[in-house]
Image: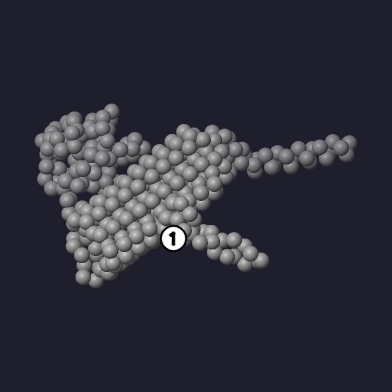
Amino acid sequence: MRSTLREIAKLIDGEVIGDPSVEVTGISGIKEARDGDLTFLANSRYAPLLSQTHASAIITSKEFSFPGKPIIRTENPSLAFAKVVSFVSPETGRHPQGIHPTALVGKRVSLGKGVSLGAYVVVEDGTRIADRTVVYPGCFIGRDSVIGKDCLIYPNVSIREKTAIGDRAIIHSGTVIGSDGFGFVNIEGKYKKIPQLGSVEIQDDVEIGANVTIDRARFDKTVIGRGSKIDNLVQIAHNVVIGENSIIVAQAGISGSTTIGSNVTLAGQSGLVGHISVGDGAIVAAQAGVTKSVAANTVVSGYPARPHNEARKVNACLQRLPELYELVAELKKRVAELEKK
């Protein structure tokens, strides 16, 4: 890579503040950058690193200024930097092509134009895979499933029968979609399995991280709404419905038949009981334990989860418990002495 800031600014529709003829020969993170590199600043928390970085230029937001180095101002620094990375390293977007000879394709399977199946992929009977979808080696796709256009399914993903996946979905390695819901009934001290007859629906533009488990519904379907993003190691139980453009962060767990609205954020290690709802725009903080429904556009934290400001007050009181314990002990001692008199 060798480009001037003027050329890069034109590519990302940015504004150069400083010398536009400065040449950039590489791209890197703000901590790792060296002389000649281009980096970016999207979060103001990292602003102190600007005085330490060795980068030759920085992509920033529109309102930001830094007199020490040339910058390119943009509406969205993260998106702009991603565009630069794609421009200078197009090979990062290359995927396998064609049908590998070891792929096993069942009967009545429909493969669209440009579909790629890697080594030892298994596609069972009645499945439909639309144009340009790429399935990496070692994946399993169960019977009568439907996968849309331009999807990317990384190695060792298991997609059980009758699963429906929309267009442009990305599914990372180790994920299991359509596993049985956790349904059992206790009869005379022994657990009997309840058949899980439903399915899973993954809508358009969903990205699912590594080692995620999404259970099939008991009768109807488990739904992941359009544009939602799921981090690694997330558990989504049977009959859960997640709305559009929601974010589910690593190690979150959602129990059965819970409904999550659109534009919701479930932070890392948050846990939700079953048969509740989380309204549109709500935020559940990290490690929160949600035991009842959450209203739209609210922030909850703690265990049991409660409005965030209330949870902060509770936590502040908990931090004072040792001091309060000593105070109560001292008061009890004084009361005992007074009673003796």
Which residue does the image show at 21% across and 43% down from the upper left?
A: 83
Which residue does the image show at 65% across and 43% down from the upper left?
A: 322
Q: Is residue 73 above or below residue 170?
A: above
Which of 182 and 235 lies nearest the eye of the viewer? 182
Q: Position of residue 3 (x, y in %)?
A: 11, 42
Residue 135 falls in image quadrant: bottom left
Q: Is residue 252 above or below residue 297?
A: below
Q: Is 301 placed left or right of 95 in the picture?
A: right
Quickly name the residue at label 1. 179
Q: Amino acid at mark 1?
A: Ser
Which of 123 and 243 lies nearest the eye of the viewer? 123
Q: Residue furthest front?
A: 108
Q: Position of residue 36 (x, y in %)?
A: 16, 44
Which residue does the image show at 38% across and 51% down from the upper left?
A: 201
Which residue does the image show at 48% across and 44% down from the upper left?
A: 259
Q: Residue furthest right?
A: 341
Way the structure is coloured: one colour
Decide if residue 156 is in sight here: no
Decide if residue 278 is in sight here: yes
Residue 104 falls in image quadrant: bottom left
Q: Position of residue 146 (x, y in %)?
A: 32, 55
| Label 1: few (<14), some (14–19) or many (≥20) C-alpha neighbours in 10 Å | many
Q: Residue furthest bottom?
A: 102
Label 1 secondary element: strand
Total number of numbered labels?
1
Quadrant placement of the C terminus = top right
Which of 54 and 244 lies nearest the eye of the viewer? 244
Q: Position of residue 305 (x, y in %)?
A: 55, 41
